[in-house]
Image: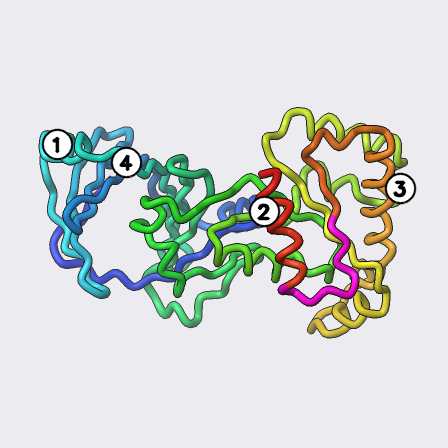
């Protein structure tokens, strides 16, 4: 662990990772260089941090002036004094990687809420190829650490599921504006078993077992307008055979939910929202109603 001090230029892009499977696949392809735990508080416009690694602990205070960070190393005593004045902290694990010239910091927040933020710095950021599952929040002031510290992130632990072209990504982007962070699919169980060659009874039993042990809620989005789903699919630059079956998968989500509802297997954690005929704003409002009531 090497902590830089002095005047440091800090230009970066920020992303929320909405799909852990895509994030892990990306991280496996790049080089990891560091792994630390950070405890962070704010006081008198300064950001105070404690870095914990296998090499021990280091402490800093930082003042940000536009794109310049003025960082000074401080003592444990100074940090603990400020820590004692705060009723809130940020605690996060930071994994640092190199992707060519780019530095990739993956912040897994544990307090005051649980979610993952990715910060990209160094190099020409306009040429950075954004990985699948990343949603940019660079220009959202609310996703600065100080706002996260104040509690801007209101809700996490929500999974949005549904067929291709049903509007999952746009819904997730809109919800981010209100501090609601959703996961795009649960790939290991829900999406993996939403296929035609798995019998309904086997699928719903796996879902029921998953719902019993997860703290998350899952929302199925469906759209029964076949023409609209196919129009959205054909508007994409690349269309696969799988994409063309979007309506059939839509019906599979619907039938699976109805079966589980009939057999009392929803565990008060699985919900279905019919988005047929809705524009994105109304679709988001219906999703928010469920989240605010049950999440």
Of residues 12 and 284, the one nearer the viewer is 284
Q: Gap between marks 1 and 4, in whole Å?
A: 14 Å
Q: Spatial distance from mark 4 to mark 2, Cα to Cα? A: 25 Å
Residue drawn 66% across the image and 47% down it: 185
Question: Which label lies toward us, 2 or 1?
Answer: 1
Q: Position of residue 29 (x, y in %)?
A: 51, 50
Specify start and end residues of the magenta stretch as a single range.
Answer: 273-281
Q: Could you tell whether 53 is left or right of 139 in the image?
A: left
Location of the N terminus by quadrant is top left
Tell me the mark number nearer the camera, choosing from 1 and 3: 1
Cα distance, mark 3 to mark 4? 48 Å
**Where's residue 41, x and y in %?**
24, 40
| Residue highlighted by disc 1 | 81
- SS assignment at label 1: helix
- Give above or below for 118 relative to 10: above
Return the residue nearer the eye: 88 or 165.
88
Residue at the spot x=47%, y=42% of the render? Answer: 115
Reply above or below: 40 against 135. above
């Amino acid at each position: 662990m090497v902590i830089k001090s002095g005047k440091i230029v800090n230009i970066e892009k920020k992303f929320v990772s909405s799909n852990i499977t895509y994030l892990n696949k990306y991280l496996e392809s790049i080089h990891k260089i560091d792994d630390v735990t950070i405890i962070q508080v704010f006081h008198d416009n300064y950001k105070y941090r404690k870095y914990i690694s296998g090499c021990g602990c280091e402490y800093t205070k930082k003042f940000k002036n536009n794109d310049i960070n003025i960082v000074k190393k401080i003592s444990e005593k100074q940090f603990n004094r400020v820590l004692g004045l705060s009723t809130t902290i940020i605690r996060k694990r930071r994994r640092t990687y190199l992707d060519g010239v780019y530095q990739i910091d993956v912040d897994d927040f544990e307090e005051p809420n649980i979610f993952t933020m990715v910060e990209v710095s160094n190099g020409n950021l306009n040429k950075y190829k954004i990985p699948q599952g990343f949603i940019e929040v660079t220009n959202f002031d609310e996703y600065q650490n100080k706002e996260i510290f104040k509690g801007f992130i209101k809700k996490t632990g929500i999974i949005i599921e549904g067929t291709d072209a049903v509007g999952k990504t746009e819904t997730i982007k809109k919800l981010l504006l209100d501090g609601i962070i959703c996961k795009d699919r649960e790939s290991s169980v829900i999406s993996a078993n939403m296929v035609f060659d798995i019998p309904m009874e086997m699928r719903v039993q796996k879902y029921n077992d998953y719902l019993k042990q997860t703290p998350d809620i899952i929302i199925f989005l469906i759209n029964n307008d076949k023409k609209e789903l196919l129009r959205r699919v054909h508007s994409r630059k690349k269309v696969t055979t799988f994409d063309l079956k979007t309506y059939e998968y839509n019906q599979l989500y619907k039938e699976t939910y109805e079966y589980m509802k009939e057999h009392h297997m929803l565990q008060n954690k699985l919900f279905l929202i019919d988005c047929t005929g809705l524009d994105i704003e109304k679709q988001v409002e219906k999703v928010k109603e469920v989240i605010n009531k049950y999440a």
